[in-house]
């Protein structure tokens, strides 16, 4: 595995896996180019060295066949504007046009390949009849595996070096994210700047945190965060739980939670998690007081009450003032902070105080030298809503890949490069 900063791309063709799965409006114009801009440092490095870049990505879910709605042709002009150079477009990713244009590519030029997912081989999922037998399924999967290898080999043949800069798809064992790496030796495959910084930042939190390490886990359901919480119990000093998931814990201890969200089937698991935390010396904090509402609406009537004594018909939608004070003190005195999930319904201003306070405390701790990582769609949206983005150490925009990394899973796209 090479490091991109130390690699000289002069005279080399680099095939780069990016995540340009960007939103488009009805006129097929890019409405948010964050992901395109994020890939600029990697592409610029290749071009400045005197290399050429072959860009590959997916867009949407075309299910293995051409669909003009999902063509990457729609982003060609916008991409050229963002990276500041002409972008050549290939009407396929492995066909004659791609091969011819890749072969003709000169140093300093950029080639954008058509949507990888126009081919079933990218994801490696064969089409199966609903009534297919087990033997037929097995045979189809084996056949697809061979086709996927051939597809990966063809993509690899377009270039001299492979760069993966798409952390958002690193948890998928797809042709372009993992299998393609098999066709490059260790010196000619590497992470791009985006994925490199993502992995290094996550490793600072997960593998080598400074103490005390505090994780804030929020969100609606405990079921969606079980594996992450279990993995974090071996790493954190403090675990702050917030949002709808906490009512399962309150009910587990016999609390009255009114109409608040609760997963009854996870009550025993909540007790088991608390027991494991105690055994490992991890302190769990949850709101003792909450803001309750008489309906899930921005114009609801509210009252402050004990978390375990919510009146019938009322539901908890945010942390209360005393709990916010406690959370802020813990966070501000931490050296490493991970935030995944809001502690209230921050989309409604009336129930945003808890999440806003968490963000403020993280910014304050970061100013004092703490390393802070915010990840997960809702947390990132919260940070952006309140303007905290510049005050935290790192913001991860990866979805499934981030969650699986936090769960301690080995991601195929990471393994393919690291070996």
Image (spheres, rainbow, N blue to C red):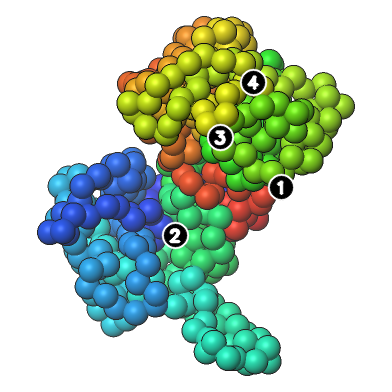
Q: Residue at x 76, y 28 (%)?
A: 253
What residue sits right under mark 3 in the picture? 259
What secondary structure is found at the residue carrying circle 1? helix
Which of discs 4 and 1 lies nearer the camera? The answer is 4
User: Can residue 11 be seen in this snapshot?
Assistant: no
Is 174 placed above or below 343 here? below
Instruction: Single out the residue that lies furthest toward the front.
Output: 312
Q: Residue at x 42, y 72 (%)?
A: 155
Which of discs 2 and 3 lies nearer the camera? The answer is 3
Where does the image place residue 238, in percent across and percent down from the top left? 69, 20
Q: Nearer the viewer, residue 104 or 133?
A: 133
Q: CA distance from mark 1 to mark 2?
A: 50 Å
The quadrant holding residue 141 is bottom right
Is 219 placed above or below 22 here? above
Q: CA distance from mark 2 to mark 3?
A: 57 Å
What secondary structure is found at the residue carrying circle 3? loop
Q: CA distance from mark 4 to mark 3?
A: 11 Å
At label 4, counting other C-alpha atoms closer than 10 Å, the crowd grade (few under 14, some 14-19, many 20 or more) is some
User: Can residue 28 be seen in this snapshot?
Assistant: yes
Of the numbered discs 2 and 3, the one sitting upstream in the chain is: 2
| CB within 8 Å, label 3 to label 1 | no
């Amino acid at each position: 595995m090479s490091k991109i900063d130390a690699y000289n791309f002069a005279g080399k063709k680099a095939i780069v896996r990016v995540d340009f799965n960007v939103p488009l409006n009805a006129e097929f114009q890019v409405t948010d180019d964050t992901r395109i801009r994020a890939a600029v440092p990697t592409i610029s490095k290749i071009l400045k060295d005197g290399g050429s870049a072959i860009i590959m990505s997916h867009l949407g879910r075309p299910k293995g066949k051409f669909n003009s709605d999902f063509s990457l042709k729609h982003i060609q002009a916008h991409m050229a504007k963002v990276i500041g150079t002409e972008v050549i477009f290939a009407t396929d990713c492995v066909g004659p046009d791609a091969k011819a244009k890749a072969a003709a590519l000169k140093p300093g030029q950029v080639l954008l390949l058509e949507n990888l997912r126009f081919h079933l081989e990218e994801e490696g999922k064969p089409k199966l009849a609903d009534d297919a037998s087990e033997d037929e399924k097995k045979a189809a999967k084996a056949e697809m595996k061979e086709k996927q290898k051939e597809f990966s080999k063809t993509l690899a043949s377009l270039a001299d070096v492979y760069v993966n800069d798409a952390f958002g798809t690193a948890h998928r064992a797809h042709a372009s994210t993992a299998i393609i790496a098999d066709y490059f030796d260790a010196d000619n495959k590497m992470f791009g700047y985006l994925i490199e910084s993502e992995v290094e930042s996550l490793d600072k939190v997960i593998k080598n945190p400074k103490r005390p390490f505090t994780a804030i886990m929020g969100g609606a359901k405990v079921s969606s965060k079980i594996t992450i919480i279990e993995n974090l119990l071996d790493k954190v000093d403090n675990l702050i739980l917030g949002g709808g998931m906490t009512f399962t814990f309150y009910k587990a201890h016999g609390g009255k939670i009114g109409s608040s969200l609760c997963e009854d089937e996870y009550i025993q698991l909540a007790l088991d998690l608390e027991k494991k935390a105690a055994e490992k010396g991890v302190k769990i904090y949850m709101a003792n007081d909450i803001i309750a509402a008489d309906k899930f609406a921005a114009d609801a009537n509210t009252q402050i009450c004990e978390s375990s004594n919510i009146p019938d018909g009322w539901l908890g939608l945010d942390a209360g003032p005393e709990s916010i004070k406690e959370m802020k003190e813990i966070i501000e005195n931490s050296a490493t902070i991970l935030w995944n999930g809001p502690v209230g319904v921050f989309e409604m201003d009336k129930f945003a105080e808890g999440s806003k306070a968490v963000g403020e405390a993280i910014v304050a701790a970061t100013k004092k030298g703490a390393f802070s990582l915010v990840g997960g769609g809702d947390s990132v949206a919260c940070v952006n809503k309140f303007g905290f983005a510049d005050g935290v150490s790192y913001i991860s925009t990866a979805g499934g890949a981030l969650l699986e990394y936090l769960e301690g899973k080995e991601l195929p796209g990471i393994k393919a490069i690291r070996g």
